[in-house]
Image (tube, rainbow, N blue to C red):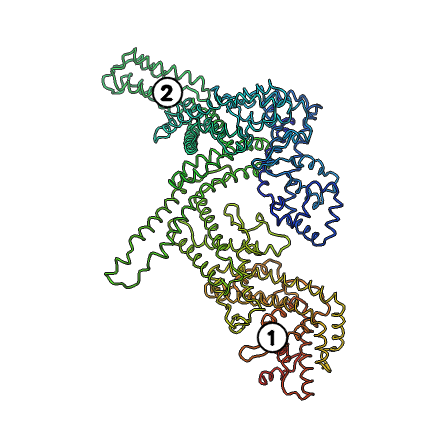
Amino acid sequence: MVDFLAENNLCGQAILRIVSCGNAIIAELLRLSEFIPAVFRLKDRADQQKYGDIIFDFSYFKGPELWESKLDAKPELQDLDEEFRENNIEIVTRFYLAFQSVHKYIVDLNRYLDDLNEGVYIQQTLETVLLSEDGKQLLCEALYLYGVMLLVIDQKIEGEVRERMLVSYYRYSAARSSADSNMDDICKLLRSTGYSGQPGAKRPPNYPESYFQRVPINESFISMVIGRLRSDDIYNQVSAYPLPEHRSTALANQAAMLYVILYFDPSILHNHPAKMREIVDKYFPDNWVISIYMGITVNLADAWEPYKAAKTALNNTLDLSNVREQASRYATVSERVHAQVQQFLKEGYLREEMVLDNIPRLLNCLRDCNVAIRWLMLHTADSACDPNNKRLRQIKDQILTDSRYNPRILFQLLLDTAQFEFILKEMFKQMLSEKQTKWEHYKKEGSERMTELADVFSGVKPLTRVEKNENLQAWFREISKQILSLNYDDSTAAGRKTVQLIQALEEVQEFHQLESNLQVCQFLADTRKFLHQMIRTINIKEEVLITMQIVGDLSFAWQLIDSFTSIMQESIRVNPSMVTKLRATFLKLASALDLPLLRINQANSPDLLSVSQYYSGELVSYVRKVLQIIPESMFTSLLKIIKLQTHDIVEVPTRLDKDKLRDYAQLGPRYEVAKLTHAISIFTEGILMMKTTLVGIIKVDPKQLLEDGIRKELVKRVAFALHRGLIFNPRAKPSELMPKLKELGATMDGFHRSFEYIQDYVNIYGLKIWQEEVSRIINYNVEQECNNFLRTKIQDWQSMYQSTHIPIPKFTPVDESVTFIGRLCREILRITDPKMTCHIDQLNTWYDMKTHQEVTSSRLFSEIQTTLGTFGLNGLDRLLCFMIVKELQNFLSMFQKVILRDRTVQDTLKTLMNAVSPLKSIVANSNKIYFSAIAKTQKIWTAYLEAIMKVGQMQILRQQIANELNYSCRFDSKHLAAALENLNKALLADIEAHYRDLHFLIPKNTLLYEITAYLEAAGIHNPLNKIYITTKRLPYFPIVNFLFLIAQLPKLQYTKNLGMVCRKPTDPVDWPPLVLGLLTLLKQFHSRYTEQFLALIGQFICSTVEQCTSQKIPEIPADVVGALLFLEDYVRYTKLPRRVAEAHVPNFIFDEFRTVL
């Protein structure tokens, strides 16, 4: 009969593919369960209020039209719904595909069973498949994996969350309309079961059997599979555990499968006491806490509580006398085997001869160790005991008392067992690889010894007092030939023959009285030794390694091992070299990967890489978590070093008196620093002792592990310092900004200095790590802050700055800002508010309008540069850009609302337009025309002024930031600054050449986009020239802005020292933000609007001057002075030639107006 798993056996390949797919689905479900968007849980009130109206459970399907009409009625809900869709459709689709694959899996399995029954596979029926060893295993696994999938989904992804995700997918995805969509079936299978993983939550009635029966499965198939699992040892595990008391451990995997599959036929659990007794007697006579898949543990005492037959059958096992007996037995066993293992692990004890002579003894010791560890870890686990269940608590307390349970001792046993197992495996692998070479070597040596002895008895060799003996000579030659004729490939015959040869050599020594000659005796003893070695070597079988692999399985502890993390970390802190022992434990844990990967590998499935990567990644994360104690301890010592260096140790001056030498020596503090530094280097040594290890398919390099650990700890501490250091009280007078920045600067400097100090002792590039991580923290926080302004938000798993191994912590927001960079930005905006302060451009300083005290100046930005570095300033700049965009968008919507939808305002503007056109003419009776228009539109200017001033204020801040960045760039990196400036000029020259001559082509590439980031980081840009938003044509735009400007001029007055300042602090207007805000706004539109705007100002100046001249008023009116100053500032800020303004105002007015002031 063809092998069931042969490639040409379609029946075997089909079920193998199904089982391989099952393992991959479970890995995907476990992977996704860590990425459930928090919003679908609707846990906190803010989420419920915001998203409660757009996230639905299955009640939506009762009347989708009703819910959708509610949404359509509110445009803001529609907008939120669309934004939510854009942000979550990707992850929701991934969840849906996983759910769909679970449904597809059971459909495929049912189809396969139908095909078997209908005879699609020639000569194969369900019965024949169950007779084949592989077929039996695969059919049992196929059903078991389906049960595990359902349990994993319910444990990891709550029912309500599943429903909300499925409804969201249904609403947002186009797939629902396709004919082949099986959305209904998926929803039926995965609707909420009412199960909750919360401690103390009540179990729903008929759970999980009603959940397992949502998709019907062939009943005879279920009963045949249960029959096979009850009667057979389907994996032949008992051969690896010959002792009867180990039988339940040998059958543990099968027991887990049976536990899951029994839920498909709950009648056995309820009404078949005989079957249940048989199952309990075979699988659970001495254990009741089992691991069902990759460390998911179940306590049968709790799980079988609702089932009469199962509960009764289990009572014998759970009888307190049995519990006491098992606990005492394992306590005794663990003590005995621990002493044995410690003896074996003594230096030089495990030699090759000793191992080869004691294989059964060593394997028995390994079995006992692993069985004891398994029983104690499972039955004392907190996760398997519900604290609210009195009976379970009682059983657990009984175990803890009778087994004299001490987690440290159990952990030590696990460590030693893992180390012992690792050494044995390595020795066996080595011996197996050298087996044939050594065997041939011993054979050659033995044969040569015999030939030499034959020569001795020939009388030719001068060996003292050995008489010639032809019989012996011929006999030894024959023996030599016999040794040479031994065949390695036929090990059984060779073994027998070798034993006979050893006997013959012993007999020849006795019968021919050869004992008298020591040298001959020595030769014979050597040969016998070589022949013994040949027998030992031929007995090195791969079966031993396989048995060790089976016995050493630690997959049951995949999750339980976490309870030992604190013990591991404590032992590493006390003795860093402990890491080498832990390496063996991690490798033992990695053997758990064999379970899910075996079938995937057999099926040659492309899922092999992603599944092995997921489980290996989980294990590596755990290794990192345990070893993180090393960087944590290092940083604790570092903080003490910083304190000593900054507070206690005084700098030695360049010259000092001899008698003061002792004072400056400060031997105590210096000794303390040396001691702490030594401790740090010992920690480093500890982690570096762990060799490069392959954990699953991921290579773990200890140096990289150390560096990542140091980075993680640095990120944690710096992020916390930034979060805590930049929290401001908005009511504080004066502002806390500068003191807090100085304090944070000192903290950051402490980190920086200590890092610089320690880098050589730890052998890392301190400055590189510092810059990379600080920039990552700041950029990540800027990104999160900017998410507030984005419709499609950047999630953590999409962020290029966030990392799984070195995560940047997130803190709960303390105000409207999400992060410290937002708080810093809003505090700067608060203290430089144009309503409260006056910005004097020439001094780059803000003064309080009422008290005339300095509020802040450009020193603020050098302080931010010192504290947060270039990244901080750059991030602040980026955030201000987003804020400007938001303000401009708000301004446009306000313009639409207030101006374009207000009939009276429109009529006023129309009248004014008619009165002032053509723009080159002089407006007669100008004062009356202008001021009546201003009076009629008075109500719209408050909101307008606020928007313009906000934009202007942020533009001033951006200018200051650019100045600071450019200054520090020229100072710290003059070559970079020069190179960037030249490249920028060259690029602009090329672009100008292209526009002058269109035949001059510019190649398409991303250079312009890439260099912008560099230029902005170096401050080589002008924020005023930036286009922030795309705009459409707006009617009346120039004239509205012109009216706005002349409406504000009466609130300002000109002083020679300060230029334009506010007349009354009660009606505040600040000139620089006003000018820059208007300028930025105009820049967003087509240049013809600016032309018209300037023409209107020119017309206003000329008309007013004309009117004054005709009325013989000698002074230039204040409003004209303001308008002229606006034009002057406009030319100055935009760096345009003065002729732009002179096109609208005669140049003599420009030249003369200051002399008149």
- Horizontal side of 491 relative to 818 (left or right) equals left
The residue that mark 2 highlights is 532
Q: Quadrant of the C terminus?
A: bottom right
- The mark that comes first in sequence, 2 or 1, is 2
Position of residue 956 measured from the top left corner of the image (x, y, whole percent): 56, 68
Q: Is residue 188 above or below residue 249?
A: below
Position of residue 6 measured from the top left corner of the image (x, y, whole percent): 60, 26
For this orientation, the residue located farthest to the front is: 390
Provide the secondary structure element on which disc 1 rests.
Answer: helix
Closer to the eye: label 2 or 1: 1
Q: Quadrant of the N terminus?
A: top right
Q: Amino acid at mark 2?
A: His
- Horizontal side of 904 relative to 679 (left or right) equals right
Instruction: Characterize the local packing of mark 2: few (<14), some (14-19) or many (20 or more) Cα atoms within 10 angstroms.
Output: some
Q: Circles 2 and 1: CB distance less than 8 Å?
A: no
Position of residue 35 measured from the top left corner of the image (x, y, whole percent): 59, 43
Instruction: Characterize the local packing of mark 1: few (<14), some (14-19) or many (20 or more) Cα atoms within 10 angstroms.
Output: some
The residue that mark 1 highlights is 1131
Q: Could you say which is closer to the camera, residue 642 or residue 739?
A: 739
Q: Amino acid at mark 1?
A: Val
